[in-house]
Amino acid sequence: MFDVDKVRADFPILKRKIHGHDLVYLDSGATSQKPESVIKAMDDYYRNTNANIHRGVYELSVESTRLVDEARKKVADFIGARTEEVIFTRNASESLNLVMYSWGRDNIKKEDAVLISKLEHHSNLVPWQELCRETGAELRIIDVDGEGKLVMRTQELKNSRTQDEVLTENGLKVRLGGFEGLIADGKVKLFAVTGASNVLGTIPDLAGMLTAIKRKAQNATVVVDASQMVPHMKVDVKTLGADFIAFSGHKMLGPTGTGVLWGKKEVLSKMRPFLFGGDMIGEVIITGATWADLPSRFEAGTPDIAGIIGLGAAVDYLEGLGMDNVRHHEKDLMVYALKKMVELQDEELVTVYGPKDVEERGGALAFNVIGVHPHDAAQILDNFGIAVRSGQHCAAPLVTGFGVPAMVRATFYVYNTKKEIDYLVDKIREIPKIFT
Amino acid sequence: MSDYKDIIIDHYKNPRNFGEMDRADISMDESNASCGDMIQIQVKTETRTDGVRLPHPDGIGVRNDEGGDLVIKEMKWRGVGCAISTAAASMLSEKIVGMNREDLEKFGEAGIVEMLGGEVNVGRMKCATLAYRGLLKIFNNE
Ligand SMILES: Cc1ncc(COP(=O)(O)O)c(C=O)c1O
């Protein structure tokens, strides 16, 4: 049974007061809060075990190395992977950059196309813009409809465009259109797509798209930005159909400074290292070096040892809750929040963005208070102790595509409650009063 | 609501010098990449050589050295922004009259905070200084 009060008791920060009010933390999409067990695991490590890994024969180093190995095993089991396929990075952005620099530069050629979607976070957009600019490959972007869902056929676009839009700037060629048209010529060599939008919550039909793409371009490599997926739902890389997935530890109750790149062993073992230096080498002579085996080959230098151990504890915590329960809890909150927000929308107080069907959306709820700039709305909510994010959420093309410069976003996680949503809705009602 | 003092609400609702100028001497755009706010600033300037300038109501603009000096005579602005950036642009459009580059630099971010009532949340400094940064650009590209 999922008991949210019990969950809340595990998060020390939830006892904090903000401007005299209880903290209502609705920004887990940016980074999640951390349970006591994660904080304690890291604290214990520094107090009792601290030593570098792989470098000493002495007890502390051996223990540290074992703790990191165990954490890797936990993460691997959590996503259904083999341990050597789990590479620790600083965050999802670094994971995606690793793929771009190491795999992308060796495999993407001028005649290829890279396919992404308009839902992407800048971390899964800008690296591919740069790769395509460098290589001359075409960047193809699946457009979104008015609900923020991916458009399958160009004809279904809201402005009933019947053709793809093509833009060229600074040597980068971009084609914007529906999924089916963009994959038709079989030129897509890389498909990098989000598993869930951090702004609108949209959960694209990955399975459907991956089947379609393999039919048109058998050898296409698939990267899933799972930053908003792994923290919120069960992910199994064995059935997902991706070659790589990237996510951040800090959005799944783990510490900042930790991220993961998972890659299929067959793909990773053919890749050149991205960063060079200590720990990633096999043999070094004065004129060169050989590379270590996976995963060390992609982990140059001393990693965030305490962070990785903390991430392992976060995985334990989530496993303890059960990922199906986590998804269920968030869906429950989203159904409730959407209903309340649609009521506000009917009263012409707010505009709500994103898919209406909760089966197609994760725990992100983007909205605007009509006539009030999102920064002002967010700051007024902060005065009531509510932490929401305002701005473009690292997805400028997506947000501005809705004809607004910015949005307010509330994101839900394991510790949020319906009572908090009631409080949010109540305080949203206060906002316009301040400006009239 | 401590962050939204009456003066901010007043300038937000009735922004001064909002609009476009017929014949501007210099135009400049400035934006906040992370929040999508944008401002276009237009100014009329004059070059003073007599060592005496339009006196500024706050006394900031008075200078006494000699030589040519670019001074803002009038400012108009347009854009999309939040209450903080809008109020700051509106207030600054009045304060800037009679200032040269040195005056503006001296006014600084501290002057902006002061102007907005003495308190700006660090997360909102980018909003508060949007127009200010646009004006600095105007002087720096003169
Ligand atoms: C969908 C998505 N991708 C990538 C990222 C980048 O994560 P990080 O900042 O940890 O690299 C985020 C975080 O905001 C995200 O939501």
Image: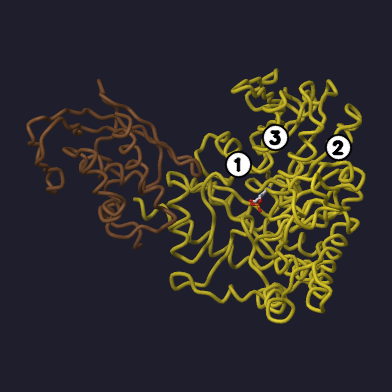
Q: Which of marks 2 and 3 is nearer the N terminus?
A: 3
Residue A32 is situated, as x and y percent measured from the top left of the image, at 65, 62
Q: Name the residue under label 1.
A: A395
- For residue A6, say whether it is visible: no
Query: Under tag 1, what secondary structure?
Result: loop
Residue neighbourhood size for the residue with mark 2, other residues' Cα within 10 Å, grouped as few (<14), some (14–19), many (≥20): some
Amino acid, disc 1: Ala
Q: Which of marks 1 and 2 is nearer the N terminus?
A: 2
Residue B108 is situated, as x and y percent measured from the top left of the image, at 28, 49
- The chain under label 2 reads A
Q: Name the residue under label 3.
A: A128
Q: Answer with the quarter of the image where residue B102 lies.
A: top left
Q: Which label is found at residue A210? A: 2
Residue neighbourhood size for the residue with mark 3, other residues' Cα within 10 Å, grouped as few (<14), some (14–19), many (≥20): many
Chain A hue?
Answer: yellow
Which chain wears brown? B
Is residue B49 placed above or below A417 in the rendered structure?
above
Residue labelled 1 has its Cβ within 8 Å of some atom of ligand 1: no
Query: Under tag 3, what secondary structure?
Result: helix
